[in-house]
Image (spheres, rainbow, N blue to C red):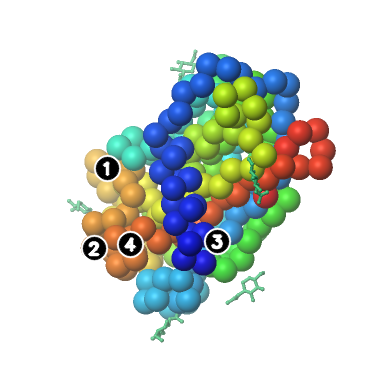
């Protein structure tokens, strides 16, 4: 597991140092997404809520380089805030739809059903990409928490004109900057004015203990599919 983790970590850093490619990928690609959640005493000793670690249903979309669902240093949109604070995906899906209609920066939304625990994995989510919408972003809330979430942003499925057979992205835990609190609880005051989205590394939260060592809380893996072209697994 150790060696795989380091490979994934490289992949994780890789997509943040955006590799620019002028060559578009051809046609459309279909991927199947699998999300592996990792938040339990086994992976994160003493950084797990007593009443059980969970994640809200993952929501995401394929998009162009013109859309940023979230990023360190950015203010959370209402949609991202709602997912991070309550797991409610309604507003984020609406934002994605508005981007689709007015800005042409997003394409297809996908969403998992139901809450899952910190060792579960969710598979079979279809993700569709095209020449212009070749990136994927997705988030889910860490439950219980004030406004912490896991997610990946701008994962690139196109490699210099070739659809990737597979792609893996690791998620560190993120803080949406919208709610006070440093424990695994939910009834806190809003942060006023709201702060920026940050990776949880230094804050005095129970999570800081493992974040300094960059233990991921979720992993998103993409793999070649049987159908059209490709699949996120
Ligand atoms: C995690 O393990 C520690 C040490 O064994 C234990 O004290 C704690 O109660 C466990 N937490 C959960 C949520 O099971
Ligand atoms: C989710 O949020 C929307 C508004 O953004 C609200 O109308 C809806 O009732 C909420 N759903 C739940 C289950 O709270
Ligand atoms: C999306 O389009 C609307 C209407 O044209 C514009 O006001 C808004 O700034 C655009 N948003 C982004 C993120 O580009
Ligand atoms: C977590 O969910 C998985 C899949 O649903 C299940 O097999 C497992 O027993 C659950 N673990 C805990 C601690 O509830
Ligand atoms: C992922 O794709 C690479 C080629 O791009 C291939 O070598 C590797 O075996 C694939 N991994 C899986 C798990 O399919
Ligand atoms: C929320 O946190 C901010 C920044 O730490 C602090 O200034 C503010 O007083 C807190 N608000 C409440 C209601 O506790």
Disc on res. 157: none
Whether label 2 touches label 3, CB < 8 Å: no
> Closer to the N terminus: mark 4 or mark 3?
3
For label 4, count other residues whose C-alpha is less than 10 Å away and answer few (under 14), some (14-19) or many (20+): few
Q: How many marks?
A: 4
Q: Is mark 1 within 8 Å of ligand 6?
A: yes
Q: Nearer the viewer, mark 2 or mark 1?
A: 2
Q: Quadrant of ligand 1?
A: bottom left
Residue 87 appears in the figure: no
Q: Separation of disc 2 and disc 1 at Cα? A: 16 Å
Disc on res. 37: 3
Q: Nearer the viewer, mark 4 or mark 1?
A: 4
State the image coordinates of residue 213 (x, y, percent, origin top left): 33, 62
Residue at point 64% right, 27% down?
A: 162
Residue corresponding to mark 4: 213
Q: Nearer the viewer, mark 2 or mark 3?
A: 3
Q: Is residue 108 above or below residue 218?
A: above
Residue at point 30% right, 37% down?
A: 73
Q: Separation of disc 2 and disc 3 at Cα? A: 23 Å
Q: Secondary structure at mark 2?
A: loop
Residue corresponding to mark 1: 195
Residue 162 appears in the figure: yes
> Closer to the N terminus: mark 2 or mark 1?
1
State the image coordinates of residue 224 (x, y, percent, origin top left): 72, 42
Whether label 2 touches label 4, CB < 8 Å: no
Disc on res. 204: 2
Residue at point 48% right, 62% down?
A: 3
């Amino acid at each position: 597991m150790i060696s795989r983790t380091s490979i994934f970590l490289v992949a994780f850093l890789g997509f943040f140092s955006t590799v620019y490619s002028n060559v578009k990928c051809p046609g459309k690609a279909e991927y199947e997404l699998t999300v592996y959640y990792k938040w339990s005493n086994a992976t994160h000793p003493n950084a797990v809520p007593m009443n059980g670690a969970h994640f809200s249903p993952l929501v995401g979309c394929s998009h162009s380089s013109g859309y940023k669902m979230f990023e360190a240093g950015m203010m959370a949109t209402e949609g991202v805030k709602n997912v991070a604070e309550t797991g409610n995906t309604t507003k984020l899906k609406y934002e994605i739809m508005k981007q689709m209609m007015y800005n042409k920066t997003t394409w297809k939304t996908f969403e998992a059903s139901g809450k899952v625990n910190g060792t579960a994995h969710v598979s079979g989510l279809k993700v569709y990409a095209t020449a212009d919408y070749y990136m994927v972003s997705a988030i889910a809330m860490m439950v219980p928490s004030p406004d912490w979430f896991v997610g990946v942003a701008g994962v690139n499925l196109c490699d210099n004109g070739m659809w990737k057979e597979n792609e893996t992205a690791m998620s560190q835990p993120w803080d949406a900057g919208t709610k006070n609190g440093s424990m695994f609880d939910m009834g806190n005051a809003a942060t006023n004015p709201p702060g920026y989205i940050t990776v949880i590394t230094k804050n005095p939260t129970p999570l800081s203990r493992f974040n300094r060592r960059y233990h991921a809380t979720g992993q998103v893996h993409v793999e070649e599919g049987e159908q059209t072209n490709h699949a996120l697994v």
